[in-house]
């Protein structure tokens, strides 16, 4: 094997080791809130977003948006609801009761 190939394999091994250590560190931060709080002072805030919070919540593809919360605004209501009046509606099934009884008995 040439010297160039050995140094290339060594470089790949170093990069692989660094990425693995970084991922394991992110997993440790996601699993331990106290350790995460030591690294990030704002780790307990709801809008805090980092690799450790994304791994802990399961959002690997994208960061979640901060919740949009605003104070409720009272909507003025000027319309009045009219009083309800009873209305009799004939049942549409009254015509279907023709075949409800058997024919008269001949005696």
Image (cartoon, rainbow, N blue to C red):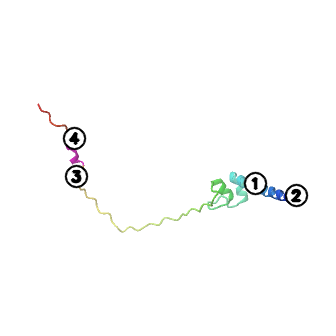
Structural crowding at the residue carrying mark 4, measured as other residues with C-alpha within 10 Å and reported as few (<14), some (14–19) or many (≥20): few
Q: What element does badge 1 sit on?
A: helix
44 in magenta: no
**Structural distance between the alpha carbons of marks 3 and 4:** 18 Å
Asked whether disc 3 touches disc 1, contact meaning CB atoms under 8 Å apart, the reply is no
**Structural distance between the alpha carbons of marks 1 and 2:** 27 Å
Q: Circle 3 is placed at which residue position?
A: 90
Image side of residue 23 versus residue 66, left or right: right
**Structural distance between the alpha carbons of marks 1 and 4:** 79 Å
Residue 20 got which mark? 1
Residue 100 got which mark? 4
Seen at 24% across and 56% down, the residue is 87
Task: Report the span colored magenta.
Answer: 93-100
Seen at 72% across and 52% down, the residue is 28
Q: What element does badge 2 sit on?
A: loop
User: Which tag, 3 or 2, sits closer to the chain's start?
Assistant: 2
Residue 25 in the image, given as x and y percentages of width and height: 74, 54
């Amino acid at each position: 094997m040439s010297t160039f190939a050995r140094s290339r394999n060594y470089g790949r091994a170093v990069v692989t080791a660094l990425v693995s250590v970084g991922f394991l560190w992110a997993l440790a931060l996601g699993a331990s809130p106290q350790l995460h709080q030591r690294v990030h002072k704002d780790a307990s805030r709801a809008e805090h977003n980092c690799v450790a919070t994304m791994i802990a919540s399961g959002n690997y593809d994208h960061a979640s948006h901060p919740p949009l919360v605003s104070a409720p605004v009272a909507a003025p209501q000027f319309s009045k609801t009219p009083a309800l009046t009873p209305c009799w509606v004939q049942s549409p099934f009254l015509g279907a009761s023709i075949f409800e009884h058997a024919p008269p008995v001949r005696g």
